[in-house]
Amino acid sequence: MIRSVICGVGSALPKKSLSNDEIAKLVKTSDSWIVQRTGIRQRYIATDNETTVSLGIKAAQAALINSGMTVKDIDCIILATSTPNRTFPASAVEIQWALGMKHGFAFDIQAVCSGFIFALVTGDAYLRCGAAKRILVIGSDTFSRILDWQDRTTCILFGDGSGAAILEAKKFEGTSADYGILSAKLRSDGEYADKLYVDGGPSTTQTTGYLRMEGREVFKHAVNIITDVVDDCFAAVEMKPSQLDWFVPHQANKRIIEASAKKLGITKDRIVITIDQHGNTSAASVPLALATAVQDGRIKKGDLIMLEAMGGGFTWGAILIRW
């Protein structure tokens, strides 16, 4: 049986960090207020010459180095982003060109904060059907460019960044003891499209507006839909949360993360949390957290890992991986 194994990870952050105290100079808020309600202490903000593409290139290069591969080994690039450099062509092809990759194919996926999860599942499907042998999956976003810096309910939450992982097809026995992606579940429900969105675009107003969010509505649904899809992932391979080594959630809000983990019976010492340093980096959130935990030695070979995310749409999903 073909499994998709993550054989390298990488990440990239902008040069400039922005603390809560600095945010408090822009809108009426405070460090203690932000930390108490979100868990965020700082975030990184792209400078004028840093973009979704430039950050994605750096994360991709880091993942290639981590894997011991070169771009010649990659057949496909999938970029998850909601903040592409241009409406078209896909920002993925710009990354492809910058890496010196003249073969294979590249494209973007847009599922907001769930984007990296959707991109990994897409890559997994391509590997298992034989369309590619190795795929570079990137989550990269620069949400600072679509924030209303006078809206304290949203501008305190988001940051910029990029994370990447390389998927490789390998043969296994087809049991839960295999390495790689063991199960994955994706969901969406357009009923909630107006709860978290950016208005405008070439097919409507010819403009790009600011991010708008009904935070209470998002919070109300988040814990239940996240835990349901995680439970479905475990059930698909007849496993339980108690067997998990690491829970790597979307870094949106520490209260959502901890409430979801508690409902699943996952103890705090098994949760990877980076929101305090990065804020919510949308599609970059999960790969940034994953790369951090791999690079600092927490995640080790053989560990059972659950990735999950929820984003605008709503979209949400989870992936169970044996590292």
Image: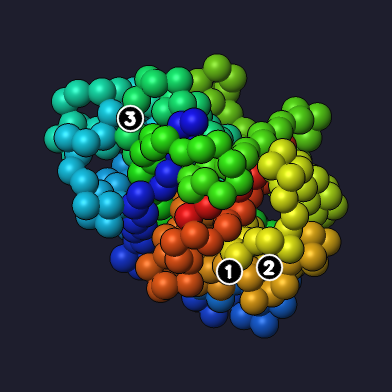
Q: Is disc 3 placed on a helix, strand or loop?
A: loop
x, y percentage for residue 296?
40, 73
Q: Is disc 1 placed on a helix, strand or loop?
A: loop
Q: Which mark is residue 289?
A: none
In front: mark 2 or mark 1? Answer: 1
Count the numbered circles shown.
Answer: 3
The residue lying furthest to the bottom in this view is 32
Q: Which mark is residue 273?
A: 1
Q: Is disc 2 placed on a helix, strand or loop?
A: helix
x, y percentage for residue 255?
74, 67
Disc 3: which residue: 133
Residue 223, quarter of the rendered image: bottom right
Give the crowd class for mark 1: few <14, some 14-19, many >=20 residues within 10 Å: many
- Residue 170 in the image: above or below residue 44: above
x, y percentage for residue 75?
28, 28
Residue 40, quarter of the rendered image: bottom right
Q: Is residue 79 visible?
A: no
Q: Is residue 245 visible?
A: yes
Give the crowd class for mark 3: few <14, some 14-19, many >=20 residues within 10 Å: many
**Residue at the spot 53% in from the left edge and 42% down from the top edge:** 181
Disc 2: which residue: 254
In front: mark 3 or mark 2? Answer: 3
Three-letter code for the amino acid on which mark 3 is drawn: Lys
Kindly indicate whether the residue at mark 1 contacts the one at mark 2 (C-beta within 8 angstroms): yes
Kindly indicate whether the residue at mark 3 contacts the one at mark 1 (C-beta within 8 angstroms): no
- Residue 280 in the image: above or below residue 130: below
Give the crowd class for mark 2: few <14, some 14-19, many >=20 residues within 10 Å: many
**Residue at the spot 52% in from the left edge and 46% down from the top edge:** 178
Of callouts 3 and 2, the N-terminal one: 3
Three-letter code for the amino acid on which mark 1 is drawn: Ile
Three-letter code for the amino acid on which mark 2 is drawn: Lys
